Image (tube, helix red, strand yellow):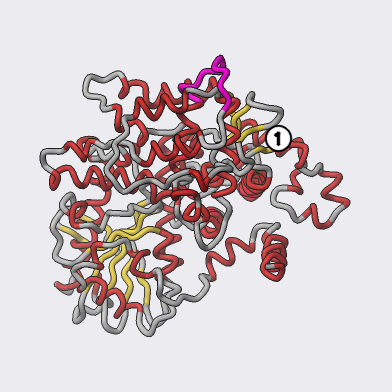
Amino acid sequence: MHPNGESQSNSRVAPYASSPVVIQDSEYCRLIRRFPPSALLPGIAAAAAHFGQPGDVHRWLGSPGRKYTPWALADAARVSLVNGNEHRNRQPRDQDLFEILNAYSQLDDPYRRSKNLAQDRLGFLLRMAGQQLIWQESDRNDLARTAAMFLHTTAAKPMQCLNEGWDTAVFGCSLTDYVGITQLVWSIALDQRGWFNPGLLPTAEQAAADPMLALMPGAYVGRERMMEVIDSQFAASAAWLRAEDERVNGKARRSPGYDRQLRRYEYNPLRARPLVTGLGPWYLCPSPALLWERATPWGIMLAGRAEFGNTFPPDVGHLFEQYIGRQLRLLPDATVRGEIRYRGPGGMCDSADWIVVFDDLILIVEAKSILPTQPMRMGDLDTIADVVDKLAKAHRQIDATAELIRNGQSEFATIPNDRPILGMAATLQPFHIANSSDHRQLMPTTTVPVTVISAAEIETLVALDVPSVSRFLMDLTADDERSTWAVSTVMAKLPQRSNPILDQGWESYPWSSSLATEAELGAEAE
């Protein structure tokens, strides 16, 4: 196969026709199982590295037929790892990966056969969001947020797990070292067509002797320590990945109502261990984006939960609440008040987390560190009650706070009650279609408009370079169409300043200055 994983005969490959060709999952998997994993996976990894290079525009948008998407490549890798057979002796030709990815783009979905499209549309939209939109976040900001939230934000409540040494307990090193190691392995995999060669890691002696090497992400840790973290956090054999796939997905696969056409939306074990051993002399990274994800705030939360259990997410929730408050305080011409204790019918209660007072608006914000669950990404409306309940609770908390403000309850005397009130439910990871009319039907009716907004969108909102953020929010809420969009879509073309909290987070990493220099040199060369 071509080193970049794309066909050498692209000019002879017809782009995906617009006619409705439907492919069954069994046929798609058969195309993959023709080849031994050791032969097919390096081509998948090379394509993922080539089309996954960082930049303002996703490179896969320019791939042949736009087929080389990160989600399609990750699924093809999963099928090869879980269902492939090393005893097959057929070698992939130039065009075979394109054929596989083209088949993926034409896979059938149960929505196509629905007898009630309006009823089943939300499940379909949840599947599409979980399949595609999670791959399109900002790499730099995700890692900057990790430091800004876990290292630079102070929780207002006692922590059960997030105390001194928690990161070493989870990762075997400090959080800064872990992020640096992740970024270094990711950059090597991108540069080496999906292969991670440990020999490219500098030793502690080399880093000490060479100032440039010392500025590489994670280099100051030393090769031996880095490899301990890599092997314990990122690497697994194909056998382990098959067992992990069975552990998570096996029960559903064997259930009477299982629909094979939903298989591609299932949990991919490469999310747990993105480096594969035993397929060559080095480690293979079939999906570099999944490696990067391990160092994001939601990757940290999942790793912490694996180590500490269910006591870890509440700690993250307390920290996230304060992080959102830090961001809101960046808003110009606004006063930010924290949670207010008040006397309710049943005793003392807490208001929503944050109340932002503008001259012409009251904005009530409730922070929820929830993540989209696997059932939500499968579009299974019968099993997403936990997520829906938490989002619904945020809506009710916002509405209750708004009523207290409107009624002039004594504890809220300093909050004006003479202006419009809007609400925002802030989430750690994006819920991309949460503002759609379909999704809003799952939420309780409120007396004030409530928008679901992610941490990344909050970071953009507070840095908008517009005359009035409050006016922007009121105009957005009043727009029947745009109010159903993700907030990031509405803000995409608006001017913005840099976010100083994210800047501080990024600059706190020891290697950030060397990466900035490298980026500047690259821009000059172009």
Please name whichever residue, 69 or 308, is drawn nearer the observer in this view of the structure.
Answer: 69
Asked whether the viewer can see residue 162, the reply is no
**Extreme-front residue of the structure:** 12
Q: Residue at x 60, y 25 (%)?
A: 38
Residue 160 in percent (x, y) is at 47, 42
Residue placed most toward the observer, 135 or 415: 135
In the figure, residue 331 lies in which quadrant?
A: bottom left
Measuring 15% from the left and 52% from the top, which residue is drawn there? 441
Seen from the viewer's position, the closer of residues 489 and 142 is 489
Q: Is residue 467 above or below residue 154?
A: below
Residue 423 sits inside the magenta stretch: no
In the rendered image, residue 161, in percent from the top left (x then y), is placed at 50, 42
> Which residue is more in the foreground, 225 or 199?
199
Query: Is 415 displayed left or right of 279 in the figure?
Result: left
Q: In terms of image quadrants, where is residue 232?
A: top right
Q: Position of residue 482 (x, y in %)?
A: 25, 68
Residue under circle 1?
Answer: 227
Q: Main secondary structure of the magenta part?
A: loop
Residue 89 falls inside the magenta stretch:
yes
**From which residue to which does the magenta span run?**
81-91
Q: Is residue 402 left or right of residue 493?
A: left
Q: Is residue 428 left or right of residue 108?
A: right
The amino acid type, in three-letter code, at marker 1 is Met
Asked which secondary structure carries label 1, the reply is helix
Can residue 35 be seen in the rendering of this structure? yes
Rendered-image quadrant of the C terminus? bottom right
Which residue is situated farthest in the left direction here? 116
Residue density around tag 1, few if under 14, some if 14–19, many if 20 or more, within 10 Å? some
x 46%, y 22%: residue: 83
